[in-house]
Amino acid sequence: MLGTRPSAKIRRAGLADLDRLLALEEATFDVDRISRDQWRRHIRSDSATVLVAPAARRIDAAAVVFYRRHARVARLYSLAVGAHARGTGLGGALLAAAEADARKRGCHAMRLEVRVDNPAAIGLYERRGYARIARLPQFYEDGADAWRYAKALTRVTQ
């Protein structure tokens, strides 16, 4: 088992991260990949947040969260963790950072879609309090179904 990574440094992505984001995307997903132009647009967008967990010469993990004007539900569009970093707690840390960003933007819930054949991601989301709310037939470009999940984002008091 790999070691845990409790103090992962997570930050917003910048345009200088494009090549490393593309490399992570290509190594992680076979279909429905985010293109260079899409990454650029998401990084620059006021209605999206791109978070990364950088390493020396790569990005170990990334998340994209979308926001709609006047909506109080954020959408976790993508969460990718490199194979070398799986099992370290990095996915959970990145998910927590995405939820914190959504709370800061005034959102009271997060929703997401995940492939029905991705038990590792499903396990992460369910352990983190996400509830399965719908099956979406042929959601992905290769025809695979997705589960839709949602979670209420409670305020964190200090």
Image (spheres, rainbow, N blue to C red):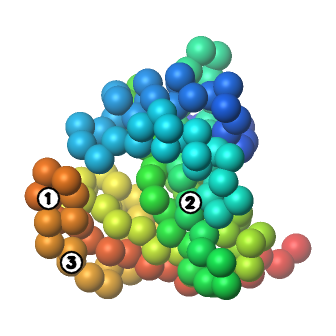
Give the Cα distance between marks 2 and 3: 21 Å
Q: Amino acid at mark 1?
A: Ala
- Which corner quadrant holds the N terminus? top left
Q: Is residue 31 left or right of residue 41?
A: left
Quadrant of the image occupied by residue 54? top right
Would residue 140 appear left or right of 45 to someone viewing this image? left
Binning the other alpha carbons within 10 Å of mark 3 as few (below 14), some (14 to 19) or many (20 upward) gives some
Q: What's the residue at 62%, 28% (across, down)? A: 17
Task: Indicate the amino acid at tag 2.
Answer: Val
> Which residue position holds label 1?
144
Q: Is residue 126 above or below residue 144?
A: below
Instruction: Give the distance between the C-alpha atoms of the residues marked 1 and 2, in whole angstroms.
Output: 22 Å
Which of the two labelled residues, at mark 2 and mark 3, occupies the earlier sequence position? Answer: 2
Residue in the picture at 42% in, 37% down = 35
Q: Are dots 1 and 2 in contact, CB under 8 Å?
A: no
Report the residue marked by disc 2: 65
Q: Which mark is residue 135?
A: 3
Residue plotted at (30% across, 39% down): 29
Q: Foreground residue, 70 or 59?
A: 70
Binning the other alpha carbons within 10 Å of mark 2 as few (below 14), some (14 to 19) or many (20 upward) gives many
Disc 2 to disc 3: CB gap under 8 Å? no
Which SS class for mark 2?
strand
Q: Is residue 51 left or right of residue 143?
A: right
Q: Are marks 3 and 1 in contact (CB under 8 Å)?
A: no
Q: Is residue 75 visible?
A: yes
User: For numbered disc 3, what is the local secondary structure?
Assistant: strand
Instruction: Tell me the amino acid under the disc marked 3.
Output: Arg
Q: Position of residue 112 (x, y in %)?
A: 42, 68
Q: In this figure, what is the number of numbered marks?
A: 3
